[in-house]
Image (cartoon, helix red, strand yellow):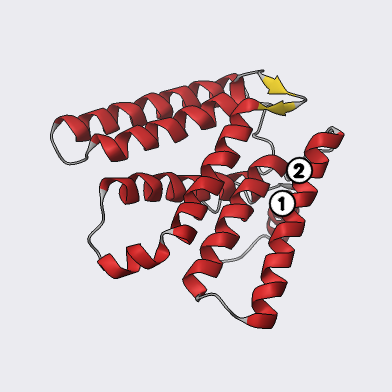
Amino acid sequence: MTVDNAALKEDIEHLEEQSFTEVDTRTRADLRTLWRGVIFALGLLLSVFHLYTAVFGTLPSHQQRTFHLAFGLGLMFLLYPAKQELTARERTVGWVLTGLGVAMLGYLVAVGIMGVHVALPATLVLAGVQAARRLPLRILGMPVADLLLAALGMAAGLYLFFNSSNIIRRAGIHDEVDLAIGTVGVLLVLVAAQRVVGSALV
């Protein structure tokens, strides 16, 4: 079997020209002074926290990680916008997948596999993701849906930060609030990863 080197070179050149990521890693460049100040303050607070704990080492690792998670999620949703330039096919697929997700959550609640305390936060995150792409509502230039997602991410991380000793003491016996917050946190980590790195990772 002989290999056609010209055809192989042409295929390699074609592959080198293609981009295999659809990620748009642009950050928000048109932020107003208020949002730049908020982002700077959050970043500064996160840096000072890490420097303080590095020098004095006063917090257990699970608390330090959840504080980092809280501020990291907040910063990601404030800095990285949702993909706005969607094709008609992407919009249709997005709505279909969201509808299927909500229907699946409803089914799981109806048959008793999942409680409302998990399905409702998951539906809230799905709605927030869709709203970030489609709703034009803004507060001083920042999309309201991104503010909501940033607040939810910070709340999920800070809940774990402030309640970590109780969660550890219960050792696997979680209440409904723990499950709701955990659902929000896991889904928002996936959404933030998709925004920053792209769908290939998620």
Query: Is residue 26 at all visible to an observer of this figure?
Result: no
Give residue 35's quadrant in the image. top right
| Percent position of residue 148, x then y | 57, 33
**Residue position for label 2:** 38
Please indicate whether residue 196 sits to the left or right of residue 168 in the image.
Answer: right
| Percent position of residue 15, x then y | 69, 52
Secondary element at image label 2: helix
Give residue 109's quadrant in the image. top left
Residue drawn at (30%, 69%), measured in percent from left and top?
Answer: 169
Disc 2 residue type (three-letter) = Val
The quadrant of the rendering that contains the N terminus is bottom right
Q: How far apart are labels 1 and 2 at the CA level?
A: 6 Å
Foreground: 186 or 64?
Answer: 64
Residue drawn at (69%, 60%), measured in percent from left and top?
Answer: 46
Please indicate whether residue 119 sits to the left or right of residue 130 in the image.
Answer: left
| Percent position of residue 195, x then y | 62, 44
Q: Dots 1 and 2: beta carbons under 8 Å?
A: yes
Foreground: 145 or 92?
Answer: 145
Residue drawn at (28%, 33%), measured in percent from left and top?
Answer: 105
Above or below, 149 relative to 91? below
Disc 1 residue type (three-letter) = Leu
**Residue position for label 1:** 42
Query: Is residue 169 at all visible to an observer of this figure?
Result: yes
| Percent position of residue 23, x then y | 67, 44
Foreground: 47 or 185?
Answer: 47
Foreground: 2 or 181?
Answer: 181
